[in-house]
Structure formats: C-alpha cells, structure tokens
Amino acid sequence: MLNNSNFIDRIRLPFRKEKGLYSSLYHILGFYPRNIQLYKQALMHKSVKKRNEKGRPLNNERLEFLGDAVLDAVVGDIVFRHFEGKREGFLTNARSKLVQRETLGKLAKEMGITQMVTTSGQATSHNSYMGGNAFEALVGAIYLDRGYSACMKFMEKRILSQLINLDKMAYKEVNFKSKLLEWSQKNRVNLEFRQLEQSVDENNSPVFVFQMFLEGVEGCSGKGYSKKESQQIACKETLQRLRREPQFIDAIFAAKANRTKMEEEPVSVPDEIVEPVAGAQDVVGKAQEPVAERSTPTAKDNDEFSLDDITATPREKTREEIIAEAEEAAFAEG
C-alpha cells in the first residue's frame, strides 16, 4: 500500500500541470483523484467527438452507464439502512427520487459539475440532462479510481449531509400519474390505463395490477394495494422508460404518426357528377385529374407526421434534445 508521501509524489507532476482541475475536483469530491484521466473523461461530453489511440470514442457515456449502476446500488444501500422497517415500495420510491435525472441535474448545477463539462461549443443539450449524465459519470470514475466505499462516502458525506435532506425527499409526494398525463397532453399522445388483474394477498388485502399504454404501445405495469397506488407505480416505471429508452419514445411517436395519418387521410370524391353524354370520357378524365393529385401523398405530406413535427421541435434538433425535452416535461415540477 502506498503511504501518503509516495502518493503525493505520484500526483505532484500532473497536479502542477492541471492544478485548477485538481482543486475543482477536490472541492466537489472531498479528495484528490489518483487517476485524473478518468475524471477528465467523465466530464467530456460526446459532442467533443474525441477518440483514443485505438480510434474509439472518448467521452463520458461508458462511465455514465457504470455510474448509473453504482449509484443505484449505493443509494439503495443508504435508503435500506436509513429507513429501517419500511416496505419495498417505499424504499424503491425513495431511491428513485434520489437518482432521477432531475435530482442529479440539480446536484450537478449546485456543485459546479455542469460548468466543468467539456463540449464542442455547439452542444445544445439541456443543462440538467447533460449535468445529470456527468454526475453519473463522475460516480463511475470514483468507483474505478477508489472503489465502492469511496462512492458510498461521497454520497453520504458530500451529498446527503450537505445538499439533500433524505427524510424530506423520501416523504415528498410525487404524483407520477399527473406528470405522465402532463407529458402526454403536451405531446398529444393518447394514454390509457388497463386493469390486468384484481386479487387478494395472503392477508386477504385487495391487490390491483394496472398497465400503461401510450398510443397502443405497451408501457409498464404496476402492482399495488389500491387502484391509485398501482397506477402510480405503472406511471413511475413508464416515466423511467421514457427518459432512458429512446426506442420506446420512437415507438410511441411512430404509432401516433400512423394514427394521425389515418385520421387525416383525404377521401377521394368526384368534383362533380357528369352526365354520360357524347364526349363524356374527356370530361370525366379532366374531372378526375385533381382528385388523383389530392389522393396521392407527397413527400411534404409525409413530413407532416415526422417525429420533429409531432413534438413541435424544430427540425434541426437532435434525438438527444427531443428525449431531454420529453424528460423535462415528464419530471417538471407540478
């Protein structure tokens, strides 16, 4: 094991070169990084389009993936020990409030992480979305640099003891159904609740299972001791999918596009009734020409049902921005 003097010798040279970065990270993390490259990568947005010596993309996406998993485990551990005797549903709800992108985005902004993210200068991602990603990536960097215990200490000492009141956040009522309804109305997406099951448990208490459908696309299901509870759980899980799975959003808006197109499909009718008199074939042919033009969809007609138009998003915006805006709408304060 390295003693303090050996460790200081190892970081002295890079520290001199990047003193500002080391100092900023110490202020955020509460310790000096050992492998500074991990933290630099955690703060590198994919818009930079940098590659390593093997030609692979060098950004924070992989560290974000790792940090997301580590954060779930760490926060789950903290919540489990803090709320002794609480049921699984409460613990799951408390953890989700701490690790949701809105919370992480606010933490990133408050701690100065968002301002440290390196971008191409043209990145247009919403700050809370980009900052939340960077926060998760930093947790991934901490895990690789110093291990699980350091991640636990970071969350307990730097986050929960200074920035977040765990009890207040855990007991804060979040109406997931209202959030999902707001998002669906904003984007004109049809939403439906279907009751799949009603039964009783071993204590003869009623149990309900509801599933969400958005434009006929299966969302998540929820199981609870009341219809309200089961619908809330289904909505919460569906909101999680909306912010984590781009393909889920794509499927919903594709289904909406098909529905809207069918509803607005023009009906071909003759402009006028023509009597079958001499030379009528020429007249009928002329009357049918404009009808044929109207009944044939053009490229412009098809564009009316693109994802960009449906979400009222300018065409130049990227998929990431569309997902960020959907997430923002879903988790906006009511």
Image (spheres, grey):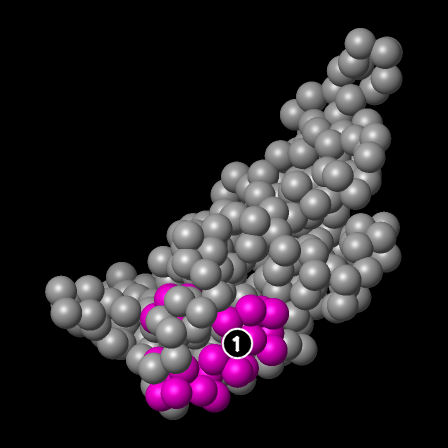
Query: In this view of the protein, which residue sits in the foreground, 267 or 246?
Result: 246
Q: Is residue 39 visible?
A: no
Judging depth in this view, the residue of 271 and 98 nearest the camera is: 98
Query: Does any portion of residue 77 appear in the rendered image?
Result: yes
Tally of numbered tags: 1
Q: Residue at x 83, y 19 (%)?
A: 206
Q: What kind of residue is marked 1?
A: Leu
Q: Residue at x 38, y 74 (%)?
A: 9
In the image, residue 36 lies in the stretch drawn in magenta? yes
Label 1 sits on a secondary structure element that is helix
**Above-or-below relation of 128 to 23:** above
Residue sticking out furthest to the left: 54
Please indicate whether residue 205 sits to the left or right of residue 157 in the image.
right
Snapshot quadrant of residue 79: top right
Q: Residue at x 79, y 55 (%)?
A: 166
Horizontally, residue 311 falls left or right of residue 74, namely left
Give the dominant element type of the magenta stretch: helix, strand or loop. helix
Across and down, in percent, residue 323 comes to 49, 65
The C terminus: image quadrant:
bottom right
Residue 234's spot in the image, x, y percent?
Answer: 66, 40
Residue tagged by mark 1? Answer: 25
* Vertical relation: 319 (above or below) 99: below
The stretch of residues the image draws in magenta is 14-41
In the picture, measured across the screen, residue 314 lies left or right of residue 225, that is: left
